[in-house]
């Protein structure tokens, strides 16, 4: 249960095509992340799958059944919204029980399932509170609880962590990954945060301007980006791009090298430059190097103990096997 | 830093506010005072303010001469019925305009409101003829329908603004949770809109209670509400100010009390959406 197939799906708002003809298969039990900059159509795509928006053309199959014209209530999908979208007038217990009540389960079964979900999400002590009396993280858990009780074919998450503070976000990220490992239900997760995408996904779908740029596992995308956009979007800090004569040496219009694939030395190396900013994270240090004559800034990732200061002259050595080559259209060579 | 407000300025503002308040309330106060005077004192020159012989005589006479309770019952039925019927029609209308708007939704809303700009007397004749034809003249059901239609634009507008305040994601969540349209309105939308619906009911009840044009023109004896009760004391055969005042006081007392106890709800209703 939980195989979702999109065939030539498009979506137009007025005259703007926000999703261009698109095919995608999401296998049963996969954790798929839609990632891309804001306005790339990732949320729209999720809402099309949910049935909250109608497709302009194309078909959506859920578990081999054509669901294109099914209302959201009949698609057997559960969704967690960015704003949590809890029912403010209901207690936590009633919020979680709501989908079960709609499915007309008997009260004993509802109580049993709500108790089980509350147990899993550590919400047992809060069941009689209203959403307004909970913290952001607890509200998020209630939203997840409401999604898991009905045992849906797939979970849809629409930027669920973006309203949480950084520390909580990391915690919830782990909880959602753990939930997936335990339930083994298909999950589709929308985010603009590539770190979330890399850490959680079995499969990442990178979108830009309503078009799928690449689909693959996090490491596939990291190692073999199909084009400059994906190369620049996946990985943090961003990949360095160098055009001009240096790229021509590699028979490319542009070459890309990740900050972690550049060695830095005081004495010798291929490229010479001067440090403009160094960011010490403890475990790592990021150097932003200027005046290389190659690109405005080259970012280098080095160990935490490497110390250079503003203005120091350094030599950089890219690892040749890690250089990505792109043509004038930005496609990988 | 908060702006420092001088004592003088504060005093001035307080006096001004009270003056305006009293000025607006004065006619009602005067009516209530007059209702406790004798007919002679009511027309005394110079007018008597508080120093007169307080009497309940007028109330006794009014009660004796006409059946207050019958008018009151009619008022309650007409105002209550038209409000409930209006809510019943307006909730789905406001729901669809707030949550599934089309290109013309704004136009429809404005058009509905524009009907309130038409002078009521302009459609009196056709409505009167329709009422004769349908046998609705001087019936409570006829008045319920007319007052409902008269107030419907306001009910729809008020509910529309309340519904607009409800985040659409919550309704989408309900849809994802398997709620049918009926369940969505019943379990999610309505409970969340209860404060708004309550204010709407209250305001429209008051509007319908006070409505005089249609209630006077379309009733005679059977369905006459309190407005007709007051009017019956302002007959041309003589000026009985004290009795007229007693009748008026009796007619406005219920709504005044209702308004007093629900002022919080009313103010919230009228300023809803204005302050976030």
Image (tube, coloured by chain):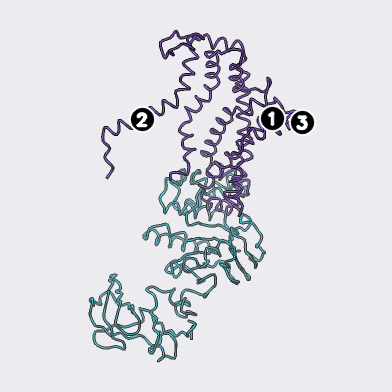
Residue holding disc 1: B142
Q: Earlier in the sequence, mark 3 or mark 2?
A: 2
Mark 2 packing: few (<14 Cα in 10 Å), some, or many (20+)?
few
Q: Which residue is mark 3?
A: B133
Mark 2 to mark 1 CA distance (whole Å):
45 Å
**Which of the labelled discs sits on residue A62, or is there none?**
none
Foreground: B53 or B84? B53
Q: Please name whichever residue, A115 or B164, is drawn nearer the observer in this view of the structure.
A: B164
Closer to the chain start, of discs 1 and 3, is: 3
Instruction: Note the chain letter of the purple one.
Output: B
Q: Residue at x 46, y 16 (%)?
A: B33
Proximity of marks 2 and 1: CB atoms separated by less than 8 Å? no
Q: Residues within 10 Å of mark 3 (few under 14, many from 20)?
A: few
Separation of residues labelled 1 and 3 (CA atoms): 12 Å
Residue A142 image position (x, y, % from top left): 48, 51
- The chain identifier of the residue carrying mark 2 reads B
Give the residue at mark 2. B16
Chain identifier for the cyan-coloured part of the image? A
Tell which tag, 2 or 1, sits nearer the viewer.
2
* Count of residue discs: 3
Whichever of callouts 2 and 1 sits on the residue coming sooner in the sequence is 2
Label 2 secondary element: helix
Seen at 38% across and 90% down, the residue is A245
Task: Sort mark 1 into few (<14), some (14-19) or many (20+) by Cα contacts within 10 Å.
Answer: many
In the picture, the quarter occupied by the N terminus of chain B is: top left
Q: Position of residue B79 (x, y in %)?
A: 60, 29
Q: Are marks 3 and 2 in contact (CB under 8 Å)?
A: no
Q: Is residue A164 above or below residue A265?
A: above
Mark 3 element type: helix
User: Can see residue A169?
Assistant: yes
């Amino acid at each position: 249960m939980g195989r979702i197939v999109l065939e030539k799906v498009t979506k137009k708002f007025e005259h703007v095509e926000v999703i261009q003809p698109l095919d995608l298969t999401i296998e049963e039990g996969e954790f798929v992340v839609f990632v891309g900059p804001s306005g790339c159509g990732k949320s729209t795509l999720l809402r099309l799958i949910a049935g909250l928006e109608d497709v302009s053309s194309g078909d959506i199959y859920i578990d081999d059944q054509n669901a294109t014209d099914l209302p959201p209530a009949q698609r057997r999908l559960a969704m967690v919204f960015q704003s949590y979208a809890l029912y403010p007038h209901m207690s936590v217990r009633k919020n979680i029980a709501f989908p079960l009540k709609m499915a007309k389960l008997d009260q004993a079964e509802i109580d049993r399932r709500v108790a089980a979900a509350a147990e899993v999400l550590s919400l047992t002590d809060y069941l009689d509170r209203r959403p307004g009396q909970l913290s952001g993280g607890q509200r998020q858990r209630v939203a997840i609880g409401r999604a898991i009780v009905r045992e849906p074919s797939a979970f849809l998450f629409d930027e669920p962590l973006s309203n949480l503070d950084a520390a909580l976000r990391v915690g919830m990220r782990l909880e959602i990954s753990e939930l997936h490992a335990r339930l083994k239900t298909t999950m589709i997760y929308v985010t603009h945060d590539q770190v979330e995408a890399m850490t959680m996904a079995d499969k990442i779908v990178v979108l830009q301007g309503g078009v799928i740029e690449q689909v693959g596992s996090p490491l596939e995308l990291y190692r073999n980006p199909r084009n400059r956009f994906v190369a620049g979007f996946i990985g943090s800090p961003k990949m360095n791009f160098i055009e001009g004569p240096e790229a021509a040496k590699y028979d490319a219009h542009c070459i890309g090298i990740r900050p972690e694939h550049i060695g830095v030395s005081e004495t010798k190396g291929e490229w010479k430059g001067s440090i403009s900013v160094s960011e010490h994270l403890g475990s790592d240090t990021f150097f932003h190097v200027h005046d290389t004559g190659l690109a405005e800034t080259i970012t280098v990732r080095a160990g935490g103990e490497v110390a250079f200061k503003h203005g120091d002259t350094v030599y950089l050595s890219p690892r040749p096997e890690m250089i990505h080559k792109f043509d004038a259209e930005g496609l990988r060579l | 830093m908060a702006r420092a407000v001088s004592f003088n300025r504060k005093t001035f503002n307080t006096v001004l506010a009270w003056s305006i308040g009293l000025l607006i309330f004065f006619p009602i106060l005067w009516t209530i005072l007059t209702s406790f005077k004798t007919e002679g004192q009511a027309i005394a020159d110079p007018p008597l303010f508080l120093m007169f012989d307080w009497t309940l005589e007028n109330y006794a006479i009014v009660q004796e001469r006409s059946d207050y309770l019958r008018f009151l019952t009619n008022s309650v039925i007409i105002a209550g019925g038209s409000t409930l019927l209006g809510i019943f029609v307006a909730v789905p209308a406001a729901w669809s305009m707030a949550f599934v708007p089309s290109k013309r939704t704004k136009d429809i809303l404005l058009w509905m409101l524009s009907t309130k700009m038409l002078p009521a007397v302009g459609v009196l004749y056709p409505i009167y003829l329709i009422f004769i034809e349908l046998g609705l003249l001087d019936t409570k059901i006829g008045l319920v329908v007319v007052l409902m239609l008269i107030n419907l634009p306001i009910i729809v507008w008020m509910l529309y603004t309340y519904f607009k305040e409800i985040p659409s994601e919550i309704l989408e969540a309900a849809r994802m949770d398997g709620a049918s349209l009926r369940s969505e309105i019943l379990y999610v939308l309505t409970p969340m809109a209860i404060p708004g619906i309550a204010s709407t009911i209250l305001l429209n009840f008051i509007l319908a209670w006070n409505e005089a044009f249609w209630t006077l023109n379309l009733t005679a004896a059977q369905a006459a509400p309190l407005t007709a009760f007051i009017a019956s004391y302002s007959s041309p055969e003589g000026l009985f100010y004290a009795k007229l005042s007693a009748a008026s006081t009796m007619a406005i007392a219920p709504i005044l009390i209702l308004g007093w106890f629900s002022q919080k709800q009313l103010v919230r209703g009228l300023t809803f959406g204005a302050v976030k």
